[in-house]
Image: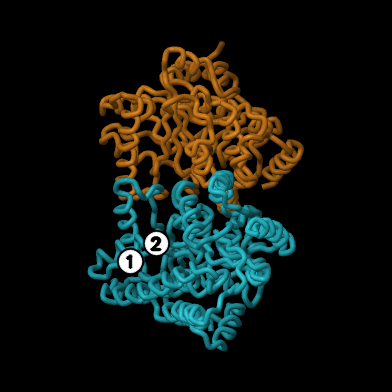
Chain colours: A cyan, B orange
Amino acid sequence: MASEKYEVHKRMYEVLKGRDTPGAKMLAEWLEGVFHAVDEGRPVVYHSFALFSEVIIALDLQPLCCEAWDMLASRVDPQHPLKSIDAAHEAGIPSEMCSFDKAILGSVMRETMPPPSMIALSATPCQNAYITYQAVAHITGAPMWVSDIPYNMDEQGARDYWVEQYQGLIAFLEEQSGRKMDYDRLREVVEESNRCVEYWLELMELQKMKPAPRTGPLWSGTYAGMTSFGLPSSTAAVKATLDRAKEDVAQGKAAVPDEKARAVWFHFPVGWDTGLMKWMADMGVSVPFVEFDGYRAEPVDTSTPESMIRGMAGRALEVPMVKIAQGATDRYIEDLLYVIREWKADCAIIAGHPGCKWITGAHGLIRDACREEGIPILLYDLDLVDDRVTPEEESRAKIEQFLNMVLDRED
Amino acid sequence: MTALEELRRPAASLSNPHMERWKENGGRVIGYYCTYVPVEIIHAAGVLPFRMRATGSTSTELGDVYAAYNTCTFCRHSLDQAMRGAYGFLDGLVALFSCDHVRRMYDVWKLGKVELPCAPFYLRFLSVPVKADAAAVAWLAEEFERFKTSLEEHFGVTISDEALRRSIKTYNEQRSLLRRLYEMRKQDSPPVTGAEALEILIAATSMPVEEFNDLLRELLEELKGREGCSDYRARLLLGGVDLEEPAYVRLIEDLGGLVVTDFLCFGIRDFWDPVEENEEPMTALARRYIQNVSCPRMIDHEGRQEFMQQLVKDFRVDGVIIQRMKYCDLWGGEGAMIQWDMRKNGTPCMVLEREYLMSSVGQMRTRVQAFLETIGSY
């Protein structure tokens, strides 16, 4: 079978199938969907995490979020993304580009990711992403749609233009697949994603409690948004996380019972340092908010096709990272300070992922803003995918030094 | 002084006698960071558009307070210049999402970390699409209209359609003259070197366009009698990121590679396509600026590739050098893709990484020499 070549993902699939949790089930179903699509010759649609998969699912096409594909593989083979990154380097892609994107490109080159039938991209959150997806289209020859996005969404007409881009995405998928959107089916999918969002928002709300019921990334939400948004499996995965958190709250349990300080992790979680949050918890520090879980949009109005498209387009602006990357630094700072306030954090940690020039280029401004508010902030070099850039020991040493300072201050 | 000598001067410093005269006469100047800024609208407001450079900068000490180490050195130097007050001649600044580096540099200006050269200072960030279909053209036409209105309000002027059409015509004339210059570079013995061409293109963005056009017309006459360059080993296309250092091109040319054409911001990407004069001005400008030969900020790699292949053919190019500033993401990806494509088509191609200030000259010389030898063996 054609899908047999994706050996690492097959292994991951077997691991997930053996686990009886809604989160594992969601991911297993997604991988199974990709494998079946490959074996049956059904269209596989690449999309970046910045575009949710509802319209792809409603057209009965197989979504493949490239960032999620590589992240998952690292769970069974930590070397997998590194091999792909190296392949991209060998092909002339510079080392300082985003390692998420280099891994995607390398995986396409190594053929460890199924080839796309078409590509759906949003021109956000950064240029690393869209230059990479252009290269993927160039290599594979797959047609690509790009949803263009106005820089300043408050500008007159910006929302309408963005909604038109979303309509264009649907038209592109219809044209390439030869299928017609069934808006009743889309309504079912969006109602499902609405339920998922409600649980997600409730979970995020719960995280505001002191002490917080959970610390660190809430992976079910992260993967739900990237792989299966609009499918019952994603709703079940998020609901299960919420239910467990509620139970813990009811029983007076917290992720870090003796919570001495709370930190906001304002970026994507570190993929390779899986013990980081536990290690921070041992210091008495909880992380009630990780930016990549920080989805804060309202449910979509499903009364008409137009209201659904407008709602989905609006919701796509609230995707983690997109929310803070799109537009000027003021938006980023405003959101960071809001999150610190609302989730009652004592400090913030921002990993200087080398690909994210849109954050590192604003480090000075972010630092000034936090200083003015009296909020300790750690801005440091850390590649979120590639541990060869800043090894674990070095990374933790920086965090430890910073947290000790925060804890002293709290005392 | 010959026209060529006069046109080569502005590249050597931020200011130049033409701009100084303009300022002395009460003229105002707006700096802009990208070829996607419609200079015609600024010109129609009676303001001199000045393409931002960091010429003369020697350090990034102050710029580094706000820009991280992995911000490209052009932005770090330019920010440093701004913080040292080197852009004192500016009355305003316009930028857009050229890249993640430039947009953050603009934010440093906007959030008050740069002492503004005057008050009130005009600051504007344009929202320019990354694709070029009909919807994008319509959006950009509206954005240009808003830009026009903000200029009118800030500078207390009225930009009439007639003034805009006149500006379009004047800049089209500049483009047409520059294309005549580039036509001459197709000759076996081009009358200007690549370094001189770059200096001329920098002048085009640093002085009143009318004065530039007069000088360029003179130059084109002068060049008819000038002995061309024939002592070269290979005809090169130089592409890549924003390059404002003629010495960089000179180094390549000293080794025997003559740059006969380019794919640069201070080059073809700035002037190649004219604005349609018989169309409603804002739509015509919008169309021209995003349907023009594109830079990698636009999602149009295939279009760029086709255009460059045509340049290779038309200018009888033997080899392509893409210079890329370290940490530039757009040219990081685009440079690699160009290299894949050029090699597939049998055109030798090399990507050279550089910093804003020329450094590692020995290493660069070795790589260029080796490349020129490779061309010989193709």
Q: Quarter of the image holding residue A80?
A: bottom right
Image location (x, y in percent) of residue B278:
26, 33
The residue singled out by tag 1 in the image is A175
**Residue B213 vertical position relative to residue B140 in the rendered view, above or below:** above
Q: Residue furthest top?
A: B1
Q: Is residue B255 left or right of residue B319?
A: right
**Residue B193 found in image quarter:** top right
Asked whether B73 or B8 is in front, the reply is B73
The numbered dot on residue A316 is 2
User: Disc 1 is attached to a residue of which chain?
Assistant: A
Say if A348 sits above or below B106 in the image.
Answer: below
Image location of residue A403, percent across then percent down: 66, 59
Quarter of the image for the C terminus of chain A: give it. Answer: bottom right
Across and down, in percent, residue B70 comes to 63, 47
Q: Amino acid at mark 1?
A: Glu
Horizontal side of A239 relative to B372 (left or right) equals: left
